[in-house]
Amino acid sequence: MRILIIEDDREAAAYLVKALREAGHVADHAADGDSGWNFAEDGGYDVMVVDRMLPRRDGLSIIEGLRTKGDQTPVLILSALGQVDDRVTGLRAGGDDYLPKPYAFSELLARIEALARRRRPGEAETVYRVGELTLDRLSHEVKRGAEEIQLQPREFRLLEYLMKHAGQVVTRTMLLENVWDYHFDPQTNVIDVHMSRLRAKIDKGHDRSLLSTVRGAGYMIRDQAK
């Protein structure tokens, strides 16, 4: 999943981003209301985690603004304001769930996953398919036919991004920015190493390869039988 965290406590946000990425998700962070609004407006998120008390623009006004413009991305409000009236106000402003601080990460993750499952059909694709290869973004289950494939979190994110763009050439820059969160080229072979491991896991032992290198351009995953 792709998750936006709008939180002004940088230490708390760093912990949350790290934990979500270790769980195999893509997590972006905005440290104030204005940047959070800009991130949210760009769209493409499966779930947003929003603090109520933010500099420049408070969390509830962000949620209300999104709902006014028709954006129904699920929002989990995360706040130190945990009284009943606070929770009611947050939910009436357009929040889908409300978790008071302090919280347990396991509960927060379970709530995020529940919100993602609630999305109406057509709002977000949760299962990607390329030929007989399937990837479930919520359960993190990957299968080729009946065979389950075990992937490390980074391998899962890499395959998820490739399958989201199935049939298209995915460049190294696209992978660095969207899978590794690098906005520069570290001049290492990290992509080649992970791609080699991924190819071995999804193609080894099968007559037809799904993952290929497009010389001088990048990589592509597609069903060659089509």
Image (spheres, rainbow, N blue to C red):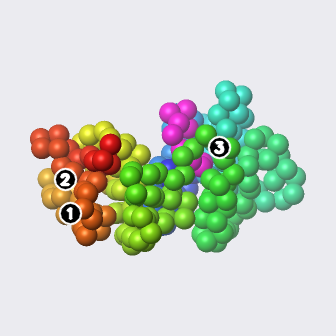
The Cα atoms of the two marked residues, 3 and 2, are separated by 39 Å
| Contact check, label 3 and label 2, Cβ < 8 Å | no
**What residue sits 74% from the left and 54% below the top?**
97
The Cα atoms of the two marked residues, 3 and 1, are separated by 35 Å
The answer to whether residue 65 shows anywhere in this view is: no
Residue 196 tag number:
1
Element marked by disc 2: loop
The answer to whether residue 96 shows anywhere in this view is: yes
Disc 1 crowd rating (10 Å Cα; few below 14, some 14-19, many 20+) is few
Q: Position of residue 111 (x, y in %)?
A: 67, 61
Which is more N-terminal, label 1 or label 3? Answer: 3
Q: Position of residue 106 (x, y in %)?
A: 61, 71
Disc 2 crowd rating (10 Å Cα; few below 14, some 14-19, many 20+) is few
- What range is drawn magenta here? 40-48
Amino acid at circle 3: Pro
| Contact check, label 3 and label 1, Cβ < 8 Å | no
**What residue sits 85% from the left and 50% below the top?**
88
Which is more N-terminal, label 1 or label 2? Answer: 2
**Residue 202 found in image quarter:** bottom left
Element marked by disc 1: helix
Amino acid at circle 1: Ser
Quadrant of the drawing holding the C terminus = top left
Q: Which residue is mark 3?
A: 121
Which is more N-terminal, label 2 or label 3? Answer: 3
